[in-house]
Amino acid sequence: MATLSSLFEYLCEKNAVDFNPVKGAKRPKVDSHEGGTPALGDHEARALLDAPDVSTLKGRRDRAMLAVLLYHGLRREELCLLKVRDIHDRRGVPHLRVHGKGG
């Protein structure tokens, strides 16, 4: 959720979106001994996908970005680095080439 919040804060700063739909969302507490980031539940993911106003171009763009983030588990920076040329077709199935952390 921190990644999504950071992304939307950045988009707000750039006036690409009007508000951060993740701001104020209750975040689960993580036991410092667990070490992992908890996954979003189905209802949380659906709420994020339903937040943008898809009747606008920006809303459709935001929903598409959220879908890519959620479906592929990308980091904010990985999403920002995506280019059209990173979409590849393998035997009729579209794939993304992600420029991830650590190379």
Image (tube, rainbow, N blue to C red):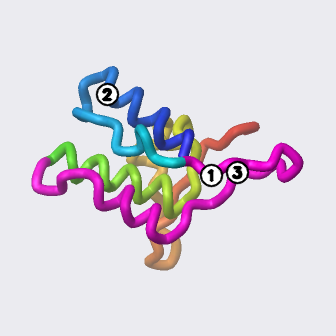
Residue sitting farthest toward the right: 33
Report if residue 65 lies within the magenta region. Answer: no
The residues bearing labels 1 and 3 have C-alpha atoms spaced at a distance of: 9 Å
The structure residue drawn at horizontal position 45% and vertical position 56%, both measured from the top left corner, is: 68
The structure residue drawn at horizontal position 39% and vertical position 36%, both measured from the top left corner, is: 8
Q: Amino acid at mark 2?
A: Cys
Residue sitting farthest toward the bottom: 91
Front: mark 1 or 3: 1
Q: Which residue is mark 2?
A: 12
Residue 29 image point, x, y percent: 68, 48
Front: mark 1 or 2: 1
Tell me if 91 is positioned left or right of 19 in this view: right
The residues bearing labels 1 and 2 have C-alpha atoms spaced at a distance of: 24 Å
What secondary structure is marked by label 2? helix
The structure residue drawn at horizontal position 49% and vertical position 71%, both measured from the top left corner, is: 42
**Does 81 sit above or below residue 69?**
above
What secondary structure is marked by label 1? loop
Q: Is tag 2's residue or tag 3's residue first in the polypeptide sequence? A: 2
What secondary structure is marked by label 3? loop
Q: Is tag 1's residue or tag 2's residue first in the polypeptide sequence? A: 2
Report if residue 39 lies within the magenta region. Answer: yes
What range of the chain is rendered magenta? 27-56
The structure residue drawn at horizontal position 45% and vertical position 46%, both measured from the top left corner, is: 25
| Magenta-drawn stretch, dominant element (helix, strand or loop) | loop
Q: Which residue is mark 1?
A: 28
Between 48 and 24, the residue placed more toward the observer is 24
**Does 26 sit above or below residue 68?**
above
